[in-house]
Amino acid sequence: MELRLPKDPAYERICSGHTPTGSASYWLGRDHLLLVETSFVTEQCRRFELRDLELVVVQPTSTRLVAGSVLACAFVVLLSLAAIASFRAASSNASDAAIWAVLAGIPTVVLGAALAWVVLPGRFCRVRIRTGVQTLAAPGISRLPKATRFVARLRAALAPTVDAAPAAPLAPQPAAGNASTDPAP
Amino acid sequence: MRNPDPECPGCGRPLPTDPVELAGLAACPHCRGELTATVFPAYGRGPVIGGTAERTTADDEATCFFHPSKKAAVPCDRCGRFLCALCDLPIAGEHLCPGCVQSAQKKEGLSGVGRPRLRWDIIVWQLVLLPLLACSFVIPVTGLAAAGLAVWGLRAPPSRVVHTRARLWAGLVAGLVVAAGGTVFWIVAATR
């Protein structure tokens, strides 16, 4: 019976995250990196031999700054409205003001949560993983701290593998592509 | 098929190809966007091309099952046929011939070869929850459909990451509960 990756001692999860259509997780095997991507209702695996990884490019974006600023402005406006309504409700016992306080308070809380989600986990970034035959926009790695940890873990895992591998030519492979849809070692 | 030179993820224009220069980059030379590049030792080596099979030189040499003029390099771990370096497909620690790989792909019996898998648990739970959120009158039907799909999904290959079977069993129970609850609701509503 096929072991699930979290139960398989041969694999270590090094990164995971959400994508617009689902989620993605990265699993480090002995000599390869496995990307498991769930998109809508399908799950697909891609396998990258560690010795074929050439380059990882990480580029921070200004998404956090822009989205954070917009959300912060809206948050301040709504918070002010809620505060004014609460103050009026408290001072005049008017039921209308209490209703307004609740109506402004609910979106304020939602906006506050969204603002925290945008700002707290770190800057947004783009990550590209390059092999000999393709460049992949890494799904699920959208924050800089996560990308940094991902790259550091790859570096730590890759150094001994590459040192141990023969320089060239490598063992013959059946296909020119080095990223396949193979799930397991 | 060689991967073209590295590009800036932001502007798409080419980055320096020299590994030392690339590793030392702090920003894209074109768009000035902040950037870090981690260069691994395989950089610039290019794709690994498939092996070439040797021709046989003597009559008593074992030959490839698929290419009688090529020297056998390894037997298939499934069917035992001799394979040349060209036909040998090393997958998941096994040496397989193309025929065995094809049949294993059909049966999903080869752990190293997989097609995209349907996540039945996601389908089942969407069928259970979405009509509930929409207060739909089709709840009894979708609940039963969810239960049926949960039973069907139990026979399908599970997810490699999450515990599909537990989710499917929970979805089965939830589907039946929702279907029963929806039916009772509509009976009560119709009799009043």
Image (tube, coloured by chain):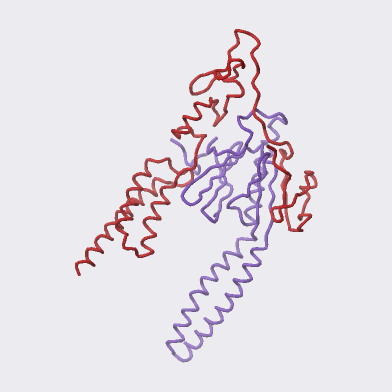
Chain colours: A purple, B red
Instruction: Spot the residue most to the bottom.
Output: A92
Determine whether A178 is above or below B166 in the image.
above
Q: Which residue appears at 19% of the width and 67% of the height?
A: B191
Instruction: Spot the residue most to the left.
Output: B191
Determine whether A174 is above or below B31 in the image.
above
Determine whether A146 is above or below A54 in the image.
below
Q: Position of residue B106 (x, y in %)?
A: 45, 33
Left or right for B41, reference B181: right
Q: Which residue appears at 53% of the width and 85% of the height?
A: A84
Determine whether B134 is above or below A4 in the image.
below
- Of residue A123 and residue A7, the one placed in the foreground of this image is A123
- Of residue A81 and residue B184, the one placed in the foreground of this image is B184
Instruction: Spot the residue most to the top.
Output: B59
Left or right for A1, reference A30: left
Q: Which residue appears at 56% of the width and 81% of the height?
A: A80
**Residue B192, image quadrant:** bottom left
Q: Position of residue A6 (x, y in %)?
A: 50, 44
